[in-house]
Image (tube, rainbow, N blue to C red):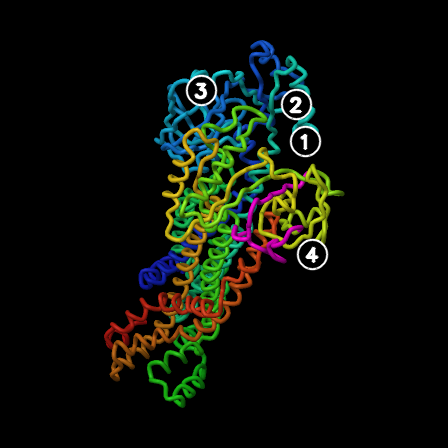
Amino acid sequence: MSWYGPVRTATGGLMRHKVQAVVIGMVLLVSTASATLGLALLAAGNAPFTHAFAAQHGADLAVTVNPARATATQLAGVRDLRGVTAAAGPFAEATVQVQYQGQPWGQFTMAGRASAGGPVDDAVLSSGHWPDAPGQVVLDEASQDFGGLQVGNRLTITGLPRATSLTVVGIANSVTDTADGWVVPGEIAALQGPGTPPSAQLLYRFTSAGTSAQLGADLAEVTGALPAGTVTGHYPWLSAESQNTSNGAIMEPFVVAFALIGLVMAVLIVANVVSGAVVAGYYRIGVLKSIGLTPAQVVVAYLSRVGLPALAGCVAGVVAGNVLAIPVLSKSAEAYGVGHQGVPWWASVLAPAGLLALTVLAAFGPALRAGRLSATQAIAAGRAPAAGRGYAVHRLAARLRLPRPIGLGLAAPFARPARTAVSLAAIAFGATALIFAFGLRSSLDQASAAQSQSATVPVEIQPNGPGTAAGPGQWPDAAQDAAVTAALRAQPGTAHQTTVYEDGVKLPGLPGSVNAWAFGGSASWLGYGVIAGHWSDAPGQVDVNTSFLTASGLSVGDTATVDTGTAQVTVHIAGEVFYPDSTPTVFGSTQTLPGLATPGNLQQWDVALRPGTTTAGYVQAVNHALGGSSPWAATTQKDGGQFYSIAIGLIGTLSLMVGIAAGLGVLNTVLMTTRDRVHDLGIYKALGMRPGQVLTMVVCWIAVPAVIAGAIAAPAAVALNTATVRAMAATAHTGVPASFTQVFPPSRLALLALAALVLAAAGALAPAIWAARARPVVALRTE
């Protein structure tokens, strides 16, 4: 017989088993899409800043200059310095006070650029267009995310002789954060405040700029080539890298965890489906062998039968994976602070190729065994399970006086123990993923609330108003600060309020400065997550973050000497708090940390509201009481950051895909069992078994594996959630409070374990309905 015969035989088998072909194709589609998305996420988390910095020609050094102190020729001559590989600018810039819808929105640095591209610092547009006329502005994504500004919003610029407004026409990303927004070059003159010296930025790339020392030498060379006093500031790329890497690192363990779950689920489900399809085809292969097919032709026939729907599923899956990746990677790019991320070509090749190879390998073993069987053995293997399997369970069910349909259903898995074991594993993985997804979301919700304090501190008073200090060293005076305290005390909705001061302090033996936060009143209500110890409740006590303990080598309960600049005080470390920052930080009262409560260190007021008080109404009332000339303004507390919202969104997407794959695996198992027992079903129905009883029996086929899978999935998900949360915390330089991982009380965990039964029932429902509706004569005639 030619090789055309086996292929034609396989095609005929597909047409006769359409449902099984569809299941194979759908499982491969979901698995390939999941694998593609997982690989894309892993690639996105692999040094995203480095890749974006190279692609967007990031600035090694952004230098701020006073163009009035140098001629155009002198500024242009810096381009030719030794070691400069590319330069852009000068771009005129201005720092402006912004209001939106009557509310202060902070200070924005605007740069005048004619285009988004150039030899240094490409600004990648994510929406809208580059400004092409006065009155238009493109915002940097970091500035846009701060307040949720969108294309079409209108910003008011305050502090200028005449009213000026800018319309947001685009959102872009500068990988090295060279500006908060960009306007046409001619707009800068209109944004320059009266009496403010002109300013411009020069952007450079150098041959050597990989370390702080090299960047210092580069800056010295630029400064030396310009007249004295021309350079007024600088921003190195290492600062932008540190910020973006710290922001994005928290997502990496989460991405890895779900990517691995998706890939393992793909392997398990594909192996289950394909192996089951091969076993289900033994009878037909035995018949074909009896009419002349050689062992090699049998293997080819069955590999072709499995390979065709698998190939279609892989192709469709890689397309679906790329489509799913578009919004996910867009959010990932925002989280990592880079302009654009896409699915790498190798992910679109490796995912389908790997899963197709897996499919062939899964099919090859059973197909090879079938090829080696004699025609008689193949027919016998395909018609019935081994003799005696399941009979003991049948007898036990009879002794327990279970209803006959339930007894028959519960005993059925023991007739095919290997198939049942694979199905059990598939359900367990699927249920583990779903329980893990719920737990991780709960953990991230707690981390977000603790980090942002948005639940306990819904309102902050910050120096964002138009009357903010006009120059260096100028701060709101004591009367203006007292007016804020009076306004907060006068509001009936104020439950708690405290002043917050921040400054650097010294710790003997620890290089560099330690960040210190001092509270002017009781701060126990602020809601910091306590990892160890307790929140300070007496003078002389402080709390610290994990980075402080790591850098100092101290532990909770130890004492430390803190130099505040005006006094050296010995403090007792009362607790370690959740504050994910690589900078060592200490928290205490102004009484414990003397010298910090100065006007220059006053950062904000934190405010808690009484029940029933609306945040928007409270903010409006406080701002009205303070007046438009106050340097302080009430603002709504922001959430924990887009990283948490992106991670929570990914949880939903990936867990849904895993759940679908697990359900399809169950469907395939029940379908194969239904085909194995179709003649039995016909006999049962001919003897009077009602459709409802048949439905109950078929669903019970998967009940025992589902219960066992649920018992396995619950503790596995708890352990996986704990490990993932701790790994995420380690990348963010912090420990975690125990409450972040204790999100599974026994009652909730028991309820979540039912996810295994839900998955199993959902997968078994379609075959069960078919079996219940099939007429006895149809069941008896079905192969």
Total of numbered circles in the picture? 4
Crowding around mark 2 (Cα neighbors within 10 Å: few <14, some 14 to 19, many 20+) is many
Amino acid on which disc 3 is placed: Leu
Q: Position of residue 758 (x, y in %)?
A: 38, 67
Residue indicated by mark 3: 191
Query: What segment carries the magenta color?
Result: 513-540
- Mark identifier at residue 212: 1
Task: Relative to 79, say whether 746 is above or below.
Answer: below
Relative depth, front residue between 136 and 598: 598
Q: Earlier in the sequence, mark 4 or mark 1?
A: 1
Image side of residue 423 versus residue 553, left or right: left
- The Cα atoms of the two marked residues, 3 and 1, are separated by 34 Å
Query: For mark 4, what is the residue?
Result: 557
Question: Which of disc 3 and disc 4 is earlier in sequence?
Answer: 3
- Check disc 2 and give the amino acid type: Leu
Q: Residue at x 45, y 86 (%)?
A: 392
Name the amino acid, label 4. Gly
